[in-house]
Image (spheres, rainbow, N blue to C red):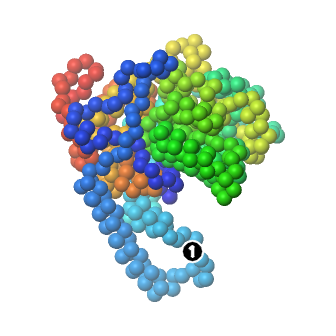
Amino acid sequence: FIFGNTDSLSIYNFPSSSSLPPRERKCPRTRFGFGSPIPHRSVPYILLSPPKMIAIPYLTALTTYFSYGLLFAFGQFRDFFRKIFDWCSSNNLQGYAPICLGLEDFYIRRLYLRIQDCFGRPISSAPDAWFDVVERHSNDNNKTLKRTSKVSRCLNLGSYNYLGFAAADEYCTPRVIDTLKKYSPSTCSTRVDGGTTALHNELEECVASFVKKPAALVFGMGYVTNSAILPVLMGKGSLIISDSLNHNSIVNGARGSGATIRVFQHNVPAHLEEVLREQIADGQPRTHRPWKKIMVVVEGIYSMEGELCKLPEIIAICKKFKAYTYLDEAHSIGAVGKSGRGVCELLGVDTADIDIMMGTFTKSFGSCGGYIAGSKELIKYLKYTCPAHLYATSISPPAAQQIISSIKVILGEDGSSRGAQKLAQIRENSNFFRSELQKMGFEVLGDNDSPVMPIMLYNPAKIPAFSRECLRQNIAVVTVAFPATPLLLARARICISASHTREDLTHALKVISNVGDLVGIKYFPAEPLKQQQGDKTVKFD
């Protein structure tokens, strides 16, 4: 059980994300890589910054460890007396073993429940730029939360609605409604029985064309796409080399495959090459036979870090060692690139160099489900062998229509330029918001052009303080902590949308700046404020 989100839940212990080392923190706040000349003409946009470990100030690390230690001590103290009271009241399990036990149960009861009001907040409207958050109250110290009839209209900085398609759209919504009337909400069948409609075939052709691969296969859930595909493709005698901060669906899929799993340091191609060289030399465990196949699994945008994958370097290494490349573009497809085609387009990578491309429709397309794109032979093989295709109900027809319509808008096939405007807007919004947060003194992870920007909180007491105070001022944010992140690296994850106006973002920056001062999470000195001129500079009180 985690604080908020499972996006980077990992079995690995490598350091996450990148930040400026101490000597560079004393210099003016410049970010490396972005805006620099590109040495290779095939890369049209940016050069990614070199990976660096987060350098946590010693005092911050000390107070964070002390806070967790204090919470743990108080929790153990309460558990000691709880056992005594349960024994005296004969409140026992009558011979049954406890279902919940161990450190996970302790963590939930004594740490998570104290601040569970900061997570799982119900909403009562579409996840647009602004949405309605249902208020809750507790009469038992947060053990249970009850919904009230009150709602708060909040600026949405937590949803993955990158291009704004999750709200009513003038092109998509009427077509989704027509599809609902024609097909009903569900096919009530699997793809191999009666669950394939003309829309499913059209969607797969549309996705394959959009990502520039020969064929594609769609699924009803993005998480299942990773966790079901990897066990089909890999097995005993195979080797999966995974980025240390890959999504939990990749971790579970790799575990379920039976393949040998090795990891490389997050976004460090040099370490990937070292791992590949070592594993190829050693071969399979015990027998030392050559590996049947090797697959390197990475993400386009890492959702807890906001970083772009160093794809060109990784592809070059995979080609050198004859390893397959598996790219998860859940957060990058539709959100980055000149025409929304993800990190491949953004970084000038030919999709023919990617063996398997995965993505989801839950972010940029405002729908549900996921896809796998690759060669026709690969997709044909998956149709006969993948359990998620053979046994799971197919994607809802209205959801399929939403994806088709949103892709048409992105490509301008709706007869307008709204798609290009959305892509330009999210890039402008993301870079503006990130730049302003950094100027205020916040420690912000990730790369330019990424709509995901984590703000480091560190101390566990600052998690509920930041979340509750933002909500009190009608700003909805997502906070994440251990075990979804390393113990010291709690953060607030901001997600920017093309639906946000400059006024929305300016208002959010003002609130977050004030809350940051109140909570004490500005770990850098702020830049001097400039006189407001036009709409490109912001002056805060």
The answer to whether residue 428 of the structure is visible from this angle is yes
Q: Quadrant of residue 408?
A: top right
Residue at the spot 52% in from the left edge and 22% down from the top edge: 348
- Residue furthest to the top in view is 415
Q: Is residue 39 above or below residue 6?
A: above
Q: Tell whether 494 sits left or right of 295.
A: left
Place of residue 117 in the rendered image (x, y in percent of width and height, measured from the top left): 41, 55
Residue at the spot 37% in from the left edge and 45% down from the top edge: 53
Q: Quadrant of the C terminus?
A: top left
Q: Tell whether 303 sits left or right of 253.
A: left
Place of residue 26 in the rendered image (x, y in percent of width and height, measured from the top left): 21, 39
Label total for image: 1
* Residue occupied by mark 1: 98
336 or 350: nearer the viewer: 350
Give the crowd class for mark 1: few <14, some 14-19, many >=20 residues within 10 Å: few
Residue at the spot 49% in from the left edge and 25% down from the top edge: 347
- Residue furthest to the bottom in view is 88
The answer to whether residue 399 of the structure is visible from this angle is no
Name the kind of residue labelled 1 in the image.
Pro
Q: Quadrant of residue 494?
A: top left
Q: Is residue 513 above or below residue 87?
A: above
Q: Tell whether 89 sits left or right of 221.
A: left
